[in-house]
Amino acid sequence: MKNFYLYLVFILISVQVNLFAQNVKNKDNYTYQVREEEGDLNHDGKMDKITVDMDIVDETRPLRLRIFLSQPNGKLTLAVSSTKIIEPQYPVENQGKHSEYQIPNFFIEKGILRMWSEIKGGNITYDFKYRDGNFELIHVKKLTHDTSKGYIDEYTVFTETDFNLITGLRTETDDVSGSGEILSKRKKTVLIRPLPKIQDFKFSDKKLY
């Protein structure tokens, strides 16, 4: 009988520990809002909203993008939630050091959700368009420079990459800082099908474009 009670106590403790662990896991720690933007994304004439929130409990400070779409009743409904699209402020591989990049900016312009991010040696802009219930990546624009001196001067060469994912045309243009002179221009066709969806998009995908 004594062993039975000990066994019962063990079971109860195990259940409580599992419930506690599940509650911690399910708790929403993305409580600090760092971005908010409003605009019409689903082309119904009503205001939709995007937010970027930070998890202030996790030491890597991950970020979550959420997209809320307007409904016929006037309310907003969560359509997309992603923690993969934005790099944490303190990536695990940096061992406690900041990523050195600012949190991306988001804009809603003419029904397009635009994401502007810093990258090594420049910046990159992604355009997502709402179609058939998904936000698809339709355009990427990237600007980088070749300097390794820590500053830009009149000899710095800039490379602008323009990638239209709908047509598949990818163009790279090199020019010297402020001169307006085109040094080189390269074009090729790269078809990506199906078009990448925002819920599947990862911040590391910048290397693909």
Image (tube, rainbow, N blue to C red):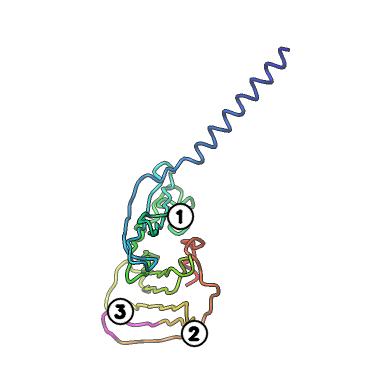
* Precedes in sequence: disc 1 or disc 3: 1
The residue type indicated by label 2 comes to: Lys
Nearest to the eye among marks 2 and 1: give it.
Answer: 1
Residue 116 picture location, percent across and down:
36, 66
Q: Quadrant of residue 106?
A: bottom left
The answer to the question of whether label 3 and label 2 lie on touching residues, with beta carbons closer than 8 A, is no
Give the image quarter of residue 186: bottom left
Q: Amino acid type of disc 1? A: Ser
The residue carrying pointer 1 sits among few (fewer than 14), some (14 to 19) or many (20 or more) residues within 10 Å by Cα, namely some
| Rendered residue at 40%/46% (across/down) | 30
Mark 1 or 3, which is nearer the eye? 1
Q: Name the residue under label 3.
A: 155
For the point 31% across and 60% down, which residue is it? 38
Q: Crowdedness of circle 2 by 10 Å Cα count: few (<14), some, many (20+)?
A: few
Mark 1–mark 3 distance (CA, rounded to whole Å):
43 Å
Q: Which range of residues does the magenta coloring cover?
A: 173-180
Q: Earlier in the sequence, mark 2 or mark 1?
A: 1
In this view, 159 is above or below 205: below
Secondary element type, mark 1: strand
Residue 198 belongs to the span the image colors magenta: no
- Residue at (62, 28) in percent of width and height: 14
- For this rendering, which residue is in front, 130 or 205? 130
Coordinates of residue 126 in the picture (x, y in percent): 40, 69
